[in-house]
Structure formats: structure tokens, C-alpha cells
Image (cartoon, coloured by chain):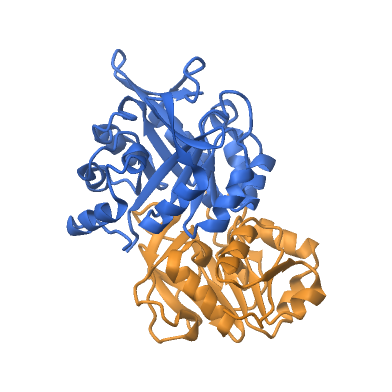
Chain colours: A orange, B blue
Amino acid sequence: MTQTTKVVIVNTGCANIYSVQCAFERLGVEVTVSDDPAVIKAADKVLLPGVGSAFAAMDSIRQKDLVGVIQSLTQPVLGICLGMQLMANTSNEKPGSHLVASKTDLVDCLGLIPTQIERMEVGELVLPHMGWNQVTLDNPHPLFKNIEEGAHFYFVHSFCAPLSEYTLAKCEYGMGFSAAIYHNNFYGVQFHPERSGKAGAQLLKNFVEL
Amino acid sequence: MLAKRIIPCLDVKDGKVVKGVQFRNHETIGDIVPLAERYAQEGADELVFYDITASSDTRVVDKSWVSRIAQVIDIPFCVAGGIKTVDQAGEILAMGADKISINSPALMDPELITKLHDTYGQQCVVVGIDSYYNKETGEYEVYQFTGDESRTLNSGRKTADWVKEVQQRGAGEIVLNCMNQDGVRQGYDLEQLKKIREVCNVPLIASGGAGEMVHFKDAYQQAGVDGALAASVFHKQIIDIQELKDYLIKEGVAIRK
């Protein structure tokens, strides 16, 4: 791929930044990891990675004074896994939430996509939802260009964005939920494209080409 | 549909992939990075790297290879071996590992599981359990320091009790290594896996005993495990991952193509 696009990964202080960076490098795309507002704002494409808990991640973003910076972005931004969840209005994941799932205990997130992150309710199935699951789309979208319908992507999560008008792609695990969401220039994927083999690499390539 | 996972396990000792039989007599299989790359290309769903000496001789896992693996493979991988603190786990995750697995350190300090959960999230906290069937008592018992035969000891815990406790403390996945079956390729310990499945509400990975393709099918279909881990059948090319996947699909197991 010829590089004309400036891709910046927001250094949220979370893990998995390095694996996202490596995935772009395998595509031949140079990326910059930064928490400098000027560098983030000047990017053509911005990645918001994240693993861990919403509470800890939002805390880190606030400490780095990046909330307003991310909210002001107008170029395409892709949130990955927890990064996607942080794009929502709220999440109900807090420390200890594997023990007590309280619907009312909310973490304020970035409010980029008007949805709420909730703990998954999957009946007899085990959580986290961990492993390779199939992703389907109701309508084609450039982010999923050249990706087979029903392709497997790698998921690891216990919280999800419910199906809504902001759903871009769906997945099924005891319940239907959003595998990808979007609103304006903000995109989020619940799975890990950086760990999803060829399909994941194609999605990252599509994002760079948006 | 969520696919069942096929997970090659690479035991690492002094920076090389090794394989022992029932935790002894380690022979060198090859270099880490090319093997990892090969398995990813052949269709492995995930990889686990165990530094088998780390816990028993008090070193932390030699980390330089973690970032080299992250650079070349595009499937998830887990690193195990001697991770005793939240900071050590963080370093390994920052080098590109998707999960960290703790075993002996969790037995010595169960609170570590909770701390890892609260810092990095449940999804990256794997607890490995070495379980041995004691014929005299008729109980499954948890062992620790299994990387070094001279230091291996009974932890005094029953396997099912420990499985319940680690979940309560925030473990996101359990790898159950059935020691009686390890390295002998006679099949996974289905009886034990079924019992543990009943008390395990997080993903359960079978480990120890894979020798033929049917062993994987039995573990998924009879014991209901989410993934099956194996080493020698892949290292020695007794089972080809793509053939295994074709076979499992034909047998009606949900598998990623």
C-alpha cells in the first residue's frame, strides 16, 4: 500500500497498542502512537485501541486530558474493542463488576456514538465471549469491503453495544449484539481486527482507505 | 456461531520451544518465532507460550520474544510463566500479548487474580491449573511448580474448589491441564473435564493428552470445552491443523475455516 495517509494511534495508556501498531506495519502502513493533541488532530485516520476496564481506561484518558481532543475529531476514527465501548455515552463496567452487575452503576464514556454499553446476558453460555465468531451485515459498508459475509473475527469481551440504529455489523452469542457501530466519522468494532487473521487485516486496510 | 478453538501450545525453555513427556525430559523442537508463524498460517486459532522453567526457578519469563511474536502473527496469543505481579503482567501485555496466564503464583497469592482483573480486565486473565488424579483418595488435586520435577508439589487444593475460587476472583478463562494424560497422547481426560465444566462459567480449555483428531472432537462434543490445547501432535506433525479443521467441520463442530 502506498502511504499518503497519516495514521495515529491514540496512546490511551491501555495494553494492545503495540499489537494494533504491528498489524498496520504488516500492511506496510506506518503509524504513530501519540497522546499529543496536535499530532492526533493532524492525523488523517485515528485509532482508539483499548483492552481492560472502561473505568480504568476513561480514568487514563481524563488524566491525559484527551477527552475534548477525541470528541473534537472530524476525520475517521476507529475504536477497537474497549476503544469502541469508550465511544458510547456510558458503560456499566466497573471494578468488581464480574461479581455484582448493577445496571445503574455507570461510567461516563466519550459520547461519540449515542449508545450504552451493557453487560452481556447470554443465559447458559459462558462469559467472557471469547474466541472466533461470525460477523454479518444488513447493508454493505466500505469498512467491510472484500470481507466475506459471515467471516470469523476474534472477540474477547463481556460487555457489548446492543443492536441499535447505530449498528453497522452484527454478531450472535446467546443474544444479538453489535459487532461494529458507527455515527458520523466515528466507527467502533467490538472484535480485535489486529488479531483476526486475513479478515481483520482487510478491515484495517479498508479503514485506512476510507 | 462461536467457533471451538484449536490451540497449539509452545513450551519455551531458554528461548527455545521444547517438549517434555509428563513434564520431564525436555527435547528441543525449534525456534519460537518461525514455529508461531507456521501455526498461525496453518490455521491455529490461538497460541499459548509457556515458559516452563520460569515459575520454578524464580525468574520472570524472558520477554524479548513476546514482541517478536506480536510483530509476525495475526491471531491471539497468551503468555505464561512466572508472572507474579501486576506490573510484570502489564509489561507482557504491552509487548503485544493478548492474555497472560498465571498458575503457581495464583496459588501462592490468589489476590493476584483480582488485581489483574481490576487493572487489565477479566478478558486477559487466564488461570492455568495442573490437576492430578489421586487414585488413593479418588480426588482431583492441584499441583504447583510443575515446570521443575524436583520442586513439584501438591498445593493441598481440590481442583473443583480452586476452579470455583479463581472465577470468583475474576479469572476470564481456565486452562485445565490433566497431568495424568499429559504427553501420552491417549486422549483428553473427558471425565475430569466434564466435572469441571459443570462448575466453570468462563471459557474452559482442555490440555493434556491429545493424540488423534477424534480426541479434539470428543473434548468439544462430550466435555463441552471451548478450546483444546495440544503440543506434540502439532510439533511432530502427527496432526495437520488444516486436516483437523476439515475433519471437525465434517463432524459438525463449529470451526473457523
On screen, residue B124 versus residue B210, left or right, reads right
On screen, residue B144 versus residue B233, left or right, reads right
On screen, residue B94 versus residue B25, left or right, reads right
Residue at 45% across / 31% down in the picture? B162
Q: Quadrant of the C terminus of chain A?
A: bottom right
Q: Quadrant of the N terminus of chain A?
A: bottom right
The residue at the far left in this view is B251
- Image-quadrant location for residue B176: top left
Q: Nearer the viewer, residue B86 or B241?
A: B241
Residue A170 position within the rendered picture, expressed as x and y whole percent measured from the top left? 41, 74
User: Is residue B135 at all visible to an observer of this figure?
Assistant: yes
Residue B145 position within the rendered picture, expressed as x and y whole percent measured from the top left? 51, 23
Residue A155 position within the rendered picture, expressed as x and y whole percent measured from the top left? 46, 61
Residue B88 position within the rendered picture, expressed as x and y whole percent measured from the top left? 66, 40
Above or below, A185 against B78 in this view is below
Q: Nearer the viewer, residue B143 or B201?
A: B143
